[in-house]
Image (spheres, helix red, strand yellow):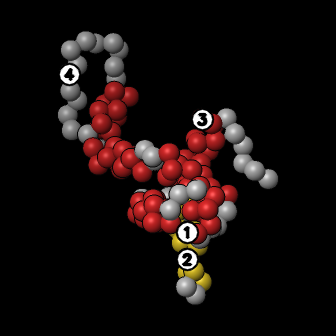
């Protein structure tokens, strides 16, 4: 990519060129937008936050959030597809928890900072 001459010069230099290069990586920004789309629902945020602290099955999540199991399954599928949660099967039971990834950990911290709460001990 060539350096784009900006309409107003404010002392731009190599940093501006690096920024312009990053701005052209639209797929990277789309990835971030897609992750945030996963958290555009209060119930989904509650489920994600819960799964940051424990491993649970659909029925227990449903009981704790007081919503139907099909609704929980819908939200879990979206969170799983985004890579924010993982699951394991034990016989017929499926257990979910937050993924151990930098992205999931960052979102967990962000939720708690915004809500001004801390993790339960």
Element at label 4: loop
Question: How far, Cα to Cα, is label 3 from label 4?
Answer: 39 Å
The residue singled out by tag 1 in the image is 58
What is the distance, in whole Å, between disc 3 and disc 1 at their CAs? 26 Å
First reached walking from the N terminus: tag 3 or tag 2: 2
In the rendered image, residue 23, in percent from the top left (x then y), is placed at: 30, 36
Where disc 2 sits, the SS reads: strand
Residue beneath label 2, please?
A: 94
- Residue at the extreme right: 121
Q: CA distance from mark 1 to mark 2?
A: 8 Å
User: Callout 3: helix, strand or loop?
Assistant: helix
Name the residue beneath numbered marker 4.
5
> Nearest the camera: 9 or 83?
83
Q: Is residue 30 visible?
A: yes
Splitting the image into 4 quarters, where does residue 36 fall? top left
Q: For mark 1, does the 10 Å Cα neighbourhood hold few (<14), some (14 to 19), or many (20 or more) residues?
A: some
From the image, tell me which residue sits under label 3: 114
Q: Quadrant of residue 3?
A: top left
């Amino acid at each position: 990519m060539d350096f784009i001459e900006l309409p107003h010069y404010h002392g731009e230099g190599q940093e501006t060129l690096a920024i312009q290069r990053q701005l052209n990586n639209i797929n990277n920004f789309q990835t971030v937008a897609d992750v945030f789309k996963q958290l555009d629902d209060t119930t989904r945020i509650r489920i994600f936050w819960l799964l940051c602290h424990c491993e649970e099955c659909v029925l227990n999540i449903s009981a704790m959030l007081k919503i139907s199991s099909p609704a929980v399954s819908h939200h879990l599928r979206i969170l799983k597809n985004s890579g924010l949660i993982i699951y394991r099967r034990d016989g017929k039971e499926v257990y979910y928890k937050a993924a151990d990834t930098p992205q999931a950990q960052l979102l967990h911290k962000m939720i708690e900072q915004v809500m001004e709460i801390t993790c339960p001990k």
